[in-house]
């Protein structure tokens, strides 16, 4: 048996981690969560098995917020998809465009300590654009707006490189919290994070209302609460406006020769926040350009990294074209 492991891509998101294996596609999609026993301090659950009040989310903005927990989680996920005991995988991961050298080193350390034999880091904006089907190989402008759990990242790309980027700490989690506050203020119920996230996603589907399970703080009993989609949009307004302003500012910093391309090609929405009803229309009105949601917005980064796994020379060829 070869001592060389598979080629694997991992989208290490603040909300979910997805793993793409060469020749198989996305084989793992689980919450980026770890549950710790409050009495012993031991880890008792990862990913889909992480439930309860002692659940931690060790990744923020695509980077380890807790290095040790992230390393353990990454190692656990890799062990689920890479069952060769003597082999170590070659791992491709997304790196936020605005990351510092220290953050890049931390991400590499986490991967190596999780027993990857080699690590390649791909700019997050490039991975998202590849997964969304943007023509990143061409020297034309294209915009990708990725709304993750903890932040929103906006990038204009040309020739396989980001030419203007912006990140704001106003992601899907801010929308989830706004929905939870809405339920508390108007219905006197408490809504946990996963229910709020589900409400956000369902608000992007057909229908005028969304039903959530909320808890009565006095009795502890759960009840169905029906939320008008329009009220969800209103609650999410401040978070959405910060994303809109960041996108407008990114366009303003874009090279003039690319603004015409953006006016024609527009922007693509990816990430969990892209599912929020009315977001694409709001951005389109403010930016004055077409804005569409990617076909598979939740999986775009993983699919883009998978493109690099399937074609390991792609990143080098894009760089040579500069």
Image (cartoon, helix red, strand yellow):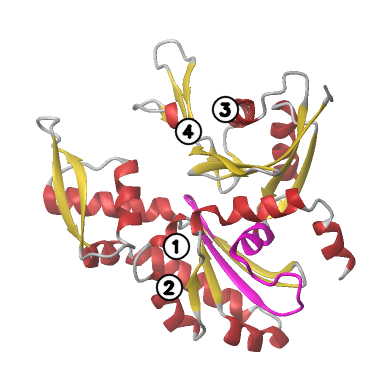
Q: Is residue 287 magenta?
A: no
Q: Which residue is mark 1?
A: 274
Q: Which residue is mark 2?
A: 280
* Number of other residues with Cα within 10 Å of mark 2, as a class: few under 14, some 14 to 19, many 20 or more: some
Q: Which residue is mark 4?
A: 33
The range drawn in magenta is: 125-152
Look at the numbered disc 4 and give the secondary structure of its residue: loop
- In x, y percent, where is residue 222? 15, 36
Q: Is residue 266 left or right of residue 91?
A: left
Compare marks 1 and 3 and give the one earlier in the sequence.
3
Q: Is residue 76 left or right of residue 243?
A: right
Q: Residue at x 60, y 54 (%)?
A: 301
Look at the numbered disc 2 and give the secondary structure of its residue: helix
Q: Which residue is mark 3?
A: 69
Q: Indicate the quadrant containing the C terminus: top left, top right, bottom left or bottom right.
A: bottom right
Q: Is residue 225 left or right of residue 115?
A: left
Look at the numbered disc 3 and give the secondary structure of its residue: helix
Look at the numbered disc 1 and give the secondary structure of its residue: helix
Q: Residue at x 53, y 35 (%)?
A: 58
Given the current orientation, which residue lies at the most extreme left position? 219
Q: Are marks 2 and 4 in contact (CB under 8 Å)?
A: no
């Amino acid at each position: 048996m070869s001592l060389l492991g598979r080629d694997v891509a991992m989208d290490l998101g603040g909300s979910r981690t997805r793993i793409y294996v060469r020749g198989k596609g996305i084989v793992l999609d689980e919450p980026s969560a770890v549950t710790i026993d409050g009495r012993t301090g031991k880890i008792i659950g990862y990913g889909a098995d992480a439930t309860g009040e002692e659940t931690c989310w060790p990744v923020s903005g695509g980077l380890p917020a807790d290095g040790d927990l992230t390393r353990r989680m990454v190692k656990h996920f890799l062990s689920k998809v890479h069952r060769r005991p003597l082999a170590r995988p070659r791992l491709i991961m997304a790196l936020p465009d605005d990351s510092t050298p220290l953050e890049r080193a931390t991400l590499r350390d986490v991967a190596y300590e999780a027993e990857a034999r080699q690590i390649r880091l791909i700019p997050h904006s490039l991975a998202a654009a590849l997964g969304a089907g943007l023509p990143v190989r061409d020297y034309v402008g294209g915009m990708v707006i990725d709304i993750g759990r903890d932040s929103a990242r906006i990038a204009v790309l040309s020739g396989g490189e980001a030419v203007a980027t912006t990140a704001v700490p106003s992601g899907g989690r801010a929308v989830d919290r706004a929905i939870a506050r809405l339920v508390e203020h108007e219905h006197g119920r408490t809504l946990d994070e996963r229910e709020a996230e589900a409400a956000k996603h369902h608000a992007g589907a057909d229908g005028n209302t969304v039903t959530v399970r909320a808890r009565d703080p006095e009795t502890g009993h759960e009840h169905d609460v029906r939320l008008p989609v329009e009220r969800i949009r209103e609650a999410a307004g401040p978070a959405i406006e910060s994303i809109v302003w960041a996108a407008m500012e990114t366009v303003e910093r874009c090279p003039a020769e690319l603004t015409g391309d953006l006016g024609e090609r527009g922007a693509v929405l990816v990430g969990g926040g892209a599912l929020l009803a009315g977001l694409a229309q709001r951005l389109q009105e403010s930016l004055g350009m077409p804005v569409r949601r990617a076909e598979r917005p939740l999986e775009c980064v993983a699919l883009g990294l998978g493109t690099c796994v399937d074609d390991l020379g792609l990143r080098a060829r894009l760089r040579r074209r500069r």
